[in-house]
Amino acid sequence: MSKATSSAPSQRMLRVGEQVRAAITQVLQRGEVRDPVIEKTVIAISEVRMSPDLKIATAYVTPLGVPNHAEVIEALNRNAKYLRGRLGPHLRQMKYMPEVRFRDDTSFDNYKKIDELLRSPEVSRDLDQTSEDEE
């Protein structure tokens, strides 16, 4: 019997990803990372995606109020090993502590583009024509 392959994450990957997200958030909120770039920035972690073997955690973050996200992402990746060590008490149930990688979350930019498209005059004109045709 062959194992079904799926690109969707398993329930376990989603659950562990949410636990890792909560643990990283707690460590950052407590100010345990001694880096001037991280200390002065409010960081929102929107999602953590786990690899199928649960050994790599990719955290998608958005630094709030900072025009240059690359600097904050670089600082987080520079301190990833320290963060990994600080996650231990929060994730005691895991066999292996995942390696944490940080990436810039661009989903908010995508949502903004879609919203601007939906509010454009061309789309509203098409929507008005559709509603007139239905009447």
Image (cartoon, helix red, strand yellow):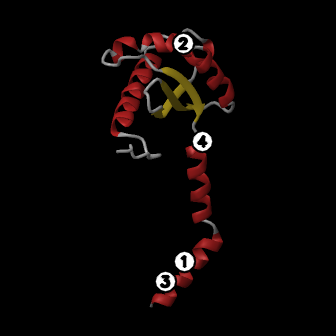
Label 1 and label 4: CA atoms lie apart by: 28 Å
Where residue 14 sits, quadrant-wise, is: top left
Element on which disc 3 rests: helix
Residue at numbered disc 3: 131
Please report contact status of discs 2 and 4: CB closer than 8 Å, yes or no. Answer: no
Please report contact status of discs 1 and 3: CB closer than 8 Å, yes or no. Answer: yes
The quarter in which the N terminus is drawn is top left
Q: Foreground mark, 2 or 4?
A: 2
Element on which disc 4 rests: loop
Q: Give the answer, above or below, for where 55 lies relative to 130.
A: above
Q: Amino acid at mark 3?
A: Ser
Q: Foreground mark, 3 or 2?
A: 2
Tell me the crowding category of disc 3: few under 14, some 14 to 19, or many 20 or more residues within 10 angstroms, Cα based.
few
Element on which disc 1 rests: helix
Report the residue at 39% width, 12% height from top. Answer: 88
Q: Position of residue 103 (x, y in %)?
A: 59, 31
Element on which disc 2 rests: helix
Q: Which mark is residue 127?
A: 1
Report the residue at 40% width, 20% height from top. Answer: 26
Q: Position of residue 29 (x, y in %)?
A: 44, 19
Going from N to C along the chain, the mark reached first, 1 or 4, is 4
Going from N to C along the chain, the mark reached first, 4 or 3, is 4
Residue at numbered disc 4: 106
Report the residue at 39% width, 21% height from top. Answer: 23
Label 3 and label 2: CA atoms lie apart by: 56 Å
Q: Amino acid at mark 4?
A: Thr
Q: Is residue 67 left or right of residue 48?
A: right
Going from N to C along the chain, the mark reached first, 2 or 4, is 2
Q: Foreground mark, 2 or 1?
A: 2
Label 1 and label 3: CA atoms lie apart by: 6 Å
Residue at numbered disc 2: 81
